[in-house]
């Protein structure tokens, strides 16, 4: 048997964190933490209210104003993440919202934003989605927005540009937006607030070619855009397309959880119903509008709007962390959490994923409370592994059917190259990222290393299909970077991807001495900060990334690195002890950890997430796993995650 190293305070640290997380469990058994993005979503919420000419909640506006002013950067603008660089689109929206709220444009913070924008060419240089908002408010012409004709909805699936070839988030945002672009409505804007002062005379719109786009494809699509701007679309065809967009949106409206369960799609659906003449109390418009309200986080002195909510994700990850503790109260809490999760499995809706995989039965879980058309492989794999662990521990039962159905769905969504995307299979039509509308470069949902690591871990933990498992392992080995790391699509970034891949490969049985495992562990050791923690900045998603650059240590990234090192059998390495010491030193009086830096990925280079739960439960997971490995009969992690 291993001997537990005498690390002072380990048990106490685990106990304090466990107790604190148990206190945060909801009465019905689930956990949900705040999910924060940048200034754009709360700013858009303010502008949506005035677009619709609703009676604004002045106290709510005041609190959103407090939030927006607090997160303004030292550069005068608003960043996409904590201490990030100036972002022109976030700054335009934040300034517009603050002016709408009533901030004096001669106030120091507004002057700084104005000057920062002018020095960068003004509001017209913002991204496509921001220019659409500006066009809806009459601040710029629709001629400055790439044309996406509503008739796109009528194209056959074999056509190179088709909604089914785009990611779920692009689909749900674009379909109602097609109607807005066709109708080109004007915001009611009862306060009459405009931002002409943010435009620089004589300066044109941003280049139609974004940095990620190739010159050839960009030139082709730019020419196509010019043609589309002058095509006289037949009225009957246009009306039929608008009706199909309306029907498509309504079919996927998703109750109070909203279209796609993400803010941009929800807001667009509300504006679509508005321009189509739906009264505010029409059931479809009313419930779409309510879905937006459900995203608000309102505190004593400030408020903001979340991009979405993460209850399934938070709950299944917390379940894994608590399962590591071996604590009786924690295990009872996990049992309640799994009971909450089980009925959320989507068994009777073939979502958009079935366009590519029509013969696969549904069986996944979504990220949010409900999102039946859009379950994801990541949540599903993590839920399944938690259920399987709990059953094997004897603290839960009755999940065999749910596990089998979910595993069948995960198997069915494996992409041809062996990996998994988050919401669709084989969503790898990379040429589409070159259309002018896709200046964000996030139109697709191709297989990624982090999600694939989770799916590999799940199949291995269940002793599932050997051929699929081997294909997943081969995909992960093939996608390892030359320095030993893996890219992290949904978490920041190579630390997250490396932990995810190593966890799955360990579950699949790759030994610590395997070259792939050794190189991954060596990379984690190499990038440890002098203070003992690990950190990585969102800037690591830059197109010209050349290797890891040091960043301040964070609780979640330190935990991921520790879990990654333990996955390669390095529990006794001095780097692990230094990492544990960092966690001990940064544990707060309430037993948990805090971090201001964003470690969640939304869309690389354009949208990031601050999961408020990550610095709480991931450190507990790492500490408890360390204790288990040091006191158990094996140095090997026995699970797929």
Image (cartoon, grey):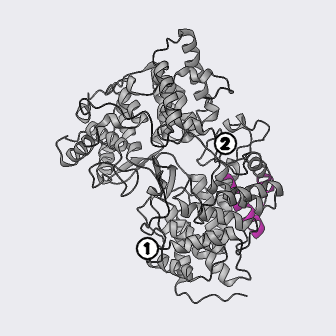
Image check: 388 left or right of 41?
Answer: right
Res. 383 image quadrant: bottom right
In the image, 570 versus 255, the foreground residue is: 570
User: What crowding class fits label 1: few (fewer than 14 Cα within 10 Å), some (14-19), or many (20 or more)?
Assistant: few
Residue 327 seen in render = no
Say if the magenta span includes residue 384. Answer: yes
In the image, 54 versus 437, the foreground residue is: 437
Earlier along the polypeptide chain: callout 2 or callout 1?
A: 2
Say if the magenta span includes residue 636. Answer: no
Task: List x then y, in percent, for residue 496.
Answer: 56, 62
Which image quarter is the C terminus in?
bottom right
* Disc marking residue 424: 2
- According to the picture, the residue beneath numbered tag 1 turns out to be 588
Residues marked 2 and 1 touching at CB (< 8 Å): no
Q: In terms of secondary structure, what is the magenta stretch mainly?
A: helix
Task: List x then y, in percent, for residue 375.
Answer: 65, 44
Residue at 56%, 83% in the rendered image:
574
Task: List x then y, in percent, for residue 285.
Answer: 50, 28
Find the magenta span and give its range: 379-404
For residue 287, above or below residue 476: above
Separation of marks 2 and 1 at Cα, in angstroms:
40 Å
* Disc marking residue 145: none
Residue at 18%, 48% in the rendered image:
108
Image check: 101 left or right of 318?
Answer: left
For residue 262, above or below residue 470: above
């Amino acid at each position: 048997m291993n001997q537990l190293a005498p690390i002072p305070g380990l048990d106490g640290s685990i106990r304090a964190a466990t107790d604190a997380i148990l206190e945060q469990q909801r009465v019905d058994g689930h956990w949900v933490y705040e999910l924060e993005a940048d200034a754009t979503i709360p700013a858009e919420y303010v502008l949506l209210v005035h677009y619709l000419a609703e009676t604004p909640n002045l106290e709510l506006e005041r609190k959103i104003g407090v939030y927006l002013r607090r997160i303004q950067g030292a550069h005068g603008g608003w960043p996409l993440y904590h201490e990030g660089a100036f972002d022109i689109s976030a700054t335009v929206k934040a300034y517009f919202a603050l002016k709408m709220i009533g901030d004096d444009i001669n106030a120091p913070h507004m002057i700084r934003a104005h000057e920062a924008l002018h020095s960068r060419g003004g509001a017209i240089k913002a991204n496509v989605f921001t220019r659409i908002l500006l066009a809806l408010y009459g601040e710029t012409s629709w001629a400055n927005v790439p044309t996406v004709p509503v008739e796109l909805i009528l194209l056959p699936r074999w056509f190179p540009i088709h909604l089914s070839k785009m990611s779920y988030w692009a689909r749900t945002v674009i379909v109602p937006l097609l109607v807005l672009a066709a109708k080109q409505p004007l915001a009611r804007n009862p306060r009459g607030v405009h931002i002409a002062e943010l435009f620089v005379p004589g300066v044109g719109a941003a280049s139609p070619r974004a940095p990620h786009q190739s010159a050839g494809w960009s030139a082709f699509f730019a020419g196509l855009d010019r043609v589309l701007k002058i095509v006289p679309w037949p009225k009957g065809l246009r009306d039929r397309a608008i009706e199909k967009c309306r029907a498509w949106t309504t079919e996927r409206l998703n109750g109070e959880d909203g279209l796609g369960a993400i803010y941009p799609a929800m807001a667009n659906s509300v504006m679509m119903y508005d321009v189509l003449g739906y009264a505010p109390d029409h059931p479809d418009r009313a419930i779409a509008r309510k879905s937006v309200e459900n995203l608000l986080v309102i505190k004593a002195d400030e408020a903001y709007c979340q991009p979405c909510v993460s209850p399934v994700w938070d709950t299944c990850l917390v379940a894994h962390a608590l399962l590591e503790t071996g604590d009786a109260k924690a295990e009872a809490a996990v049992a309640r959490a799994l009971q909450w999760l089980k009925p959320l499995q989507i068994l009777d809706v073939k979502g958009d994923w079935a366009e590519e995989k029509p013969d696969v039965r549904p069986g996944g879980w979504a990220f949010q409370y409900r999102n039946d058309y859009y379950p994801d492989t990541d949540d599903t794999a993590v839920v399944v592994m938690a259920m399987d662990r709990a059953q094997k521990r004897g603290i839960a039962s009755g999940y065999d059917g749910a596990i089998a159905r979910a595993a069948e769905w995960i198997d069915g969504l494996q992409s041809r190259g062996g990996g998994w995307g988050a919401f669709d299979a084989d969503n790898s039509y990379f040429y589409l990222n070159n259309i002018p509308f896709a200046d964000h470069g996030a139109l697709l949902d191709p297989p990624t290393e982090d999600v694939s690591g989770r799916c590999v871990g799940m199949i291995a933990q269940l002793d599932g299909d050997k051929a699929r498992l081997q294909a997943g392992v081969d995909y992960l080995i093939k996608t390892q970077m030359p320095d030993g790391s893996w890219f992290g699509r949904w978490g920041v970034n190579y630390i997250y991807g490396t932990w995810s891949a190593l966890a799955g490969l360990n579950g699949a049985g790759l030994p610590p001495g395997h070259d792939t495992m050794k190189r991954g562990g060596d990379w984690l050791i190499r990038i440890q900060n002098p203070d003992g923690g690990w950190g990585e900045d969102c800037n690591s998603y830059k197109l010209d990334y050349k290797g890891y650059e040091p960043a301040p240590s964070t609780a979640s990234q330190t935990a991921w690195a520790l879990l990654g090192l333990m996955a390669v059998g390095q529990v006794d390495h001095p780097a692990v002890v230094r990492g544990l010491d960092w966690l001990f030193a940064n544990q707060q009086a309430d037993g948990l950890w805090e971090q201001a830096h964003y470690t969640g990925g939304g869309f690389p280079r354009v949208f990031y997430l601050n999961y408020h739960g990550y610095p709480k439960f991931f450190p507990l997971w790492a500490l408890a796993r360390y204790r288990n490995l040091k006191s158990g009969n094996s140095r090997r992690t026995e699970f797929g995650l």
